[in-house]
Image (tube, rainbow, N blue to C red):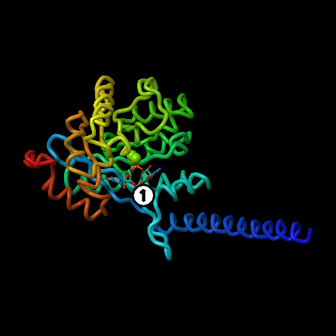
């Protein structure tokens, strides 16, 4: 009897303490992120994307990083989710998008006008009523051509709210920006949805690319590329880590390749070196067509 009373009492107290600790740490993280956004602790790295046939640089994907004081680098998977849960995503998303637009403008000035940058947009950000207006304002303020900006969206926004997603994307495409469906092949998007959304690009998820050049994986990636071609969509393979994967993805019909095999996400300075090497002066038609995969 004594024990029966004591054990649940103790475990309840423990559970309460644990709950308090967890809530406090969630609150700490939220406050730290809020402060981090203000203090410029959140920034973008840029991962090169190359042409599958020539190996030439085609552009970059901007990837958010949070250098949290006393803790170190926090994964975007974690802090974007926190920003979404706590309502910080509009502010954080707008700041990152503005940063990317200004970076595109700076690179255009230095290296010419040919390299688009893709920015990830979370579902909550995309479905925000004022999002197309925000993009329009940032394009105007940075003076970049709309086609130099690609927005990467994920399937979950579209699956949960097809009509709203369609509406937002139509407005964005009308501005002239490109739209890519990110992580394609992992979610639940139906093929008919691809027809209904005004996309420019499909990015095939690393989960489908890693097993290349296994024959069944080749079959799946080839089928996706055929479908994309019928819908007039460009295809990017993400997560290319080996030469064999690069060759298989190219032969399956992917137009562009991205992954650690080519480069990890780079600092602005290192991305600038890529631009300098591949674009040289003020335009991108440097004669490095021979660049190997
Ligand atoms: P994602 O958009 O699919 O980005 C690709 C992720 O794969 C990046 O992880 C990149 O570093 C990683 N990656 C690239 N190549 C390779 C490779 O060859 N091998 C492996 N193993 N990984 C590779 P990261 O930077 O940790 O970003 C994770 C996710 O966080 C992104 O996935 C994206 O969904 C989200 N994210 C990142 N930045 C932002 C942002 O600014 N806004 C929003 N809303 N989401 C972001
Ligand atoms: Mg992405
Ligand atoms: Mg992706
Ligand atoms: Mg992915």
Q: Which residue is mark 1?
A: 64
Q: Is mark 1 within 8 Å of ligand 1?
A: yes
Residue 121 in the image: above or below residue 229:
below
> Can you give x and y, in whole percent of width and height, for residue 127 in the image?
54, 39
Do we see residue 140 in this rendering?
no
Secondary structure at badge 1 equals strand
User: Is 55 situated left or right of 142 in this image?
Assistant: left
Q: Nearer the viewer, residue 145 or 19?
A: 19
User: Is 32 situated left or right of 216 in this image?
Assistant: right
Looking at the image, which residue is at 29% across and 46% down? Answer: 116
Do we see residue 156 in this rendering?
yes
Number of marks drawn:
1
Crowding near the residue tagged with mark 1, few <14, some 14–19, many ≥20 C-alpha atoms within 10 Å: many
Name the quadrant containing residue 64.
bottom left
User: Is 98 situated left or right of 38 in this image?
Assistant: left
> Can you give x and y, in whole percent of width and height, for residue 84 in the image?
57, 51
Looking at the image, which residue is at 11% across and 49% down? Answer: 291
Residue 274 in the image: above or below residue 251:
below
Looking at the image, which residue is at 30% across and 61% down? Answer: 266
Q: Nearer the viewer, residue 72 or 86?
A: 72
Q: Nearer the viewer, residue 217 or 105?
A: 217
């Amino acid at each position: 009897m004594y024990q029966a009373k004591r054990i649940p009492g103790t475990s309840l107290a423990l559970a309460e303490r644990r709950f308090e600790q967890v809530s406090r740490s969630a609150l700490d993280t939220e406050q730290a992120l809020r402060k981090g956004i203000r203090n410029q602790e959140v920034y973008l790295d840029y991962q090169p994307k190359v042409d599958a046939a020539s190996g030439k640089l085609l552009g970059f994907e901007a990837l958010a990083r949070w250098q949290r004081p006393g803790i170190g680098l926090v994964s975007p998977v974690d802090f974007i989710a926190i920003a979404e849960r706590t309502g910080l995503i509009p502010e954080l998303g707008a700041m990152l998008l503005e940063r990317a637009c200004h970076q595109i403008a700076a690179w255009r000035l230095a290296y010419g006008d040919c390299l688009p940058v893709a920015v990830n947009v979370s579902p909550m950000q995309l479905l925000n009523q004022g999002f197309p207006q925000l993009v329009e304002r940032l394009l105007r303020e940075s003076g970049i051509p709309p086609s130099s900006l690609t927005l990467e969206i994920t399937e979950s926004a579209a699956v949960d709210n097809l009509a709203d997603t369609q509406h937002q994307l139509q407005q964005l495409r009308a501005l002239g920006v490109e739209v890519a469906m990110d992580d394609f092949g992992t979610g639940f998007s139906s093929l008919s949805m691809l027809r209904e959304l005004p996309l420019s690009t499909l990015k095939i998820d690393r989960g489908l690319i890693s097993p290349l050049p296994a024959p069944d994986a080749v079959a799946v990636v080839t089928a996706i590329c055929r479908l994309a071609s019928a819908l007039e969509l460009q295809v990017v393979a993400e997560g290319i880590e080996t030469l064999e994967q690069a060759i298989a993805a190219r032969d399956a019909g992917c137009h562009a390749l991205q992954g650690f095999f080519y480069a990890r996400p780079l600092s602005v300075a290192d991305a600038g070196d890529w631009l300098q090497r591949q674009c040289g002066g003020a335009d991108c038609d440097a004669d490095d067509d021979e660049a190997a995969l």
